[in-house]
Amino acid sequence: MFRKGNNLNISGYTDADWAGSIEDRQSTSGYFTFVGENVVTWLSKKLEVVARSSAEAEYRGIAKEICELLWIRNLMQDLNIKQDNPMRLYCDNKVACNIAHNPIQHDRTKHVEIDRHFIKEKLEAKLIEVPHVRSQDQLADVLTKAKSSQVFHNCLENLRMSDIYAPT
């Protein structure tokens, strides 16, 4: 259910499962996009390339979610809903967050250079912020990894999702 409210800030959670595919060791990335407290888009998708590190898989997920955040922001601007605050994108991988905030190019990160320039540009324009979120608070985990029933239901509760067919 979409909850009415004055908070229309755009934010997202992104996560990745590095080399999780047993067949080809490709990673899966996923994200949730929020407007206020409401989930408006989500995605769980296998990455097209094999990531050489968990940070690379997470970083590529950050780039995908930034594109989604920008699309939502532009859509809201077309509807004359102004967004003054930077959009927050929560990631639980400290290395990926550090790469996003560190403008120095290293040989270790050369393979994600295009994504790095894209993310750096959006950070410098203050369109986005990429804070670290604790792994247990990472809502996008359910899009990339199998979770226990309790963790899954807690996540659904935090996403404010409910079964519309359940008896009331």
Image (cartoon, rainbow, N blue to C red):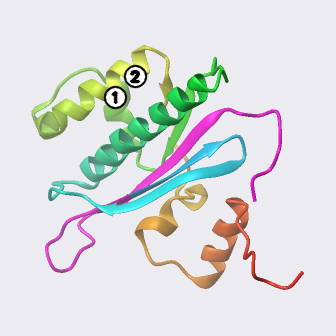
Q: Locate residue 104, reporting x and y percent.
A: 22, 21
| Residue situated furthest right in the rendering | 168
Residue 81 found in image quarter = top right
| Residue situated furthest top in the rendering | 125
Residue at x 44% of width, y 14% of height:
125
Residue at x 43% of width, y 55% of height:
15
> Which residue bears the numbered disc 2?
122
How many tags in the picture? 2
Q: Amino acid under label 2?
A: Lys
Q: Amino acid under label 1?
A: Ile
Residue at x 25% of width, y 24% of height:
117
Q: Nearer the viewer, residue 24 or 131?
A: 24
Per the picture, the main secondary structure of the magenta-coloured stretch is: loop
State how far apart marks 1 and 2 are (Cα): 5 Å
User: Mark 2 and mark 1 in contact (Cβ < 8 Å)?
Assistant: yes
Q: Is residue 18 magenta?
A: yes
Q: Locate residue 165, reporting x and y percent.
A: 75, 81
Residue 119: assigned label: 1
Q: Is disc 2 surrounded by few (<14), some (14 to 19) or many (20+) residues within 10 Å?
A: some
Q: Quadrant of the N terminus?
A: bottom right
Q: Nearer the viewer, residue 44 or 120?
A: 44
Q: Secondary structure at mark 2?
A: helix
Q: Locate residue 2, reporting x and y percent.
A: 75, 53
Residue at x 33% of width, y 23% of height:
120
Q: Locate residue 161, reporting x and y percent.
A: 70, 65
Q: Is residue 8 left or right of residue 98?
A: right
Answer yes or no: is residue 17 visible: no
> Compared with residue 68, is residue 116 higher up or lower down, i.e. above or below?
above
